[in-house]
Image (cartoon, rainbow, N blue to C red):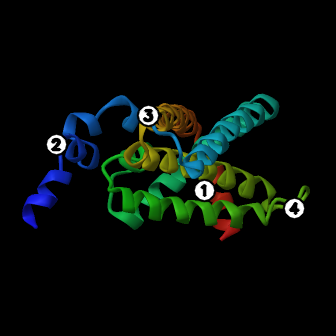
Amino acid sequence: MPMKLRRFISESLIRRLIPKAKTIMNAPWLGRDDCPVVADDIARARSTLLSVRAKIDSKGHNKVYAYGQALWHVGRLISCAHGVTEADALKARGMTADRMDLIYRDLFSSARRCRTFLQEGTQAFDMADNLATACSILKNLYRMRFHEMKASGSQQVKAGDLAERFMTLSQALCELGIAVPPADWEEKQRLAA
């Protein structure tokens, strides 16, 4: 009986069933972009970049400073809650993929909660808009960093590119926000709490 089995297990069959390492690392395996979740997240991140650009263009310098201060504030909260530096919190660096996913989920729910206060004419509108935008920017940054670590092929490259864009945006806004005296921002924050 062993002789008959040996006849059916040819070397070509083994090559087809168990590919060598160089075959697995070949371009057809790496270029697979069959994850619709990653594609949807990339599309949402691009849309967020466009909407933030439109907000900045339409609302002026004061709103840019307010967004920067809100980003800095949310970055400090992430830093305290997860034991990372503020710089790493604003860059989404120095963390595991699981930690990034946890922070993403926190930011997602925080942005949703802030949007419940977006009613024109109320005192909380400006504060809620600033915090919702900051959470949205950081949420997309963390999600793109996560996909940069976990996705494959061109989706990984696209996620990395978008993560760099969100990181540059958050750093620029934070620098502008810090340049303005935060006394008014902190007073509004105390009143809102």
**Amino acid tagged 2:** Glu
* Lower position in the chain sequence, tag 1 or tag 2: 2
Badge 1 element: helix
* Lower position in the chain sequence, tag 2 or tag 3: 2
* Lower position in the chain sequence, tag 1 or tag 4: 4
Q: CA distance from mark 2 to mark 3?
A: 28 Å
Closer to us: mark 1 or mark 2? 2
- Residue for badge 4: 122
- Percent x, y of residue 139: 56, 52
- Residue for badge 3: 31
* Lower position in the chain sequence, tag 4 or tag 3: 3
Foreground: 149 or 117? 149
Residue at point 32% right, 56% down?
Answer: 96
Q: CA distance from mark 1 to mark 4?
A: 18 Å
- Residue for badge 2: 11
- Residue for badge 1: 186
Left or right placement of residue 7 versus residue 23 in this view: left
Q: Quadrant of the C terminus?
A: bottom right
Closer to us: mark 3 or mark 1? 3
**Amino acid tagged 1:** Glu
